Amino acid sequence: MKLAFLSDIHGNAIALDAVLQDIKSKNVDKIYVLGDICYRGPEPKRSLELVQSLNCDVIKGNADEWVVRGVQEGEVPGQALEMMNRERDWIYSQMDGEAVAYLEQLPTDLTIEAEGMKIHAFHATPNSLFEVVPPFENDDVITNKLIVNEADLYIYAHIHKPFIRYINGKCVINIGSVGLPFDGVKKSSYGLIEIKDNGFQASIVRVPFDTDKVLRQYEDYNYPNAKAMINILQNAKI
């Protein structure tokens, strides 16, 4: 059985198209989406429509929460708050009530049982949509913050920097970002789990997409903060 986990699309429907095509070529059995679907990209509504068309399990990320109710003080650096809410307002204006209601009702984690394996999936941590657990954290921190329910694999997103680690017999995977990679690799990222014969293989898949076209969309659609977002996408770093 092959399971694909993707997240942090951030309104980059062109990147999502490329990832879904790659997933299709691998004959994946099930897809799971771990949040941050619309916010900060030029095609928020089409990104959401693509996700909904998959008829798969979807959970909420912090950026989905922001689309619903705005960015609040303390959630981002103070100097960024006004601009990030301008971006949020633009995203919100591209959506309809049904789309916003869909984001609002999303659950915050998934427990998946497949072929004798148990997987716990969430956006940032099991207890927060916002907490940051970077790749370089020590084993004790990752254990205390991420490995809180009994499972074989723990899969999360949020930080846009993919990695795979094994800690005390548990596999911890960050699947990176479809739409806004932050690790310097200018390609989409998603996680692929293959379960077979009571074992599994975990991998990070990188997929190229038409970056130049997305950069033009930011400008053509008059996206707020377009210059900063173009710089992030060009460099795959924040």
Image: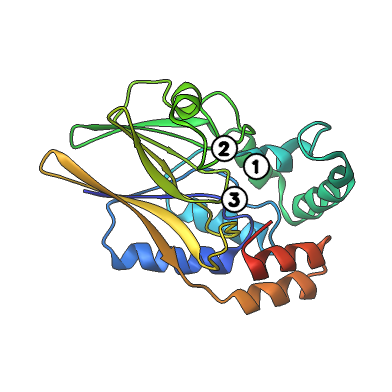
Residue lying at 65% horizontally and 67% vertically, measured from the top left: 235
Give how far apart the Cα atoms at labels 2 and 3 are. 9 Å
Q: Badge 3, how many Cα within 10 Å: few under 14, some, many 20+? A: many
Residue lying at 53% horizontally and 30% vertically, measured from the top left: 125
Quarter containing the C terminus: bottom right
The image position of residue 144, as x and y in percent, is: 48, 21
Q: Badge 1, how many Cα within 10 Å: few under 14, some, many 20+? A: many
Seen in the picture, residue 13 relative to 164 is either above or below; the reply is below
Image position of 199 (left or right of 111): left
Q: Is residue 49 visible?
A: yes
The image position of residue 17, as x and y in percent, is: 49, 67
Q: Which residue is mark 3?
A: 37
Instruction: Determine the secondary structure under disc 3.
Output: loop
First in sequence, mark 2 or 3: give its number: 3
Q: Do tag 3 and tag 1 residues touch (Cβ < 8 Å)? A: yes
Q: Which residue is mark 2?
A: 60
Image position of 1 (left or right of 32): left
Residue lying at 46% horizontally and 28% vertically, measured from the top left: 146
Seen in the picture, residue 216 relative to 184 is either above or below; the reply is below
Q: As rendered, which of 43 and 49 lies closer to the eye?
A: 43
The label shown at residue 10 is none
First in sequence, mark 3 or 1: give its number: 3
Q: Which residue is mark 1?
A: 64
Give how far apart the Cα atoms at labels 2 and 1 are. 6 Å
Q: Do tag 2 and tag 1 residues touch (Cβ < 8 Å)? A: yes
The image position of residue 154, as x and y in percent, is: 39, 34
| Callout 3 amino acid | Ile
Q: Residue furthest left?
A: 197
Q: Badge 2, how many Cα within 10 Å: few under 14, some, many 20+? A: many
Q: As rendered, which of 108 and 189 lies closer to the eye?
A: 189
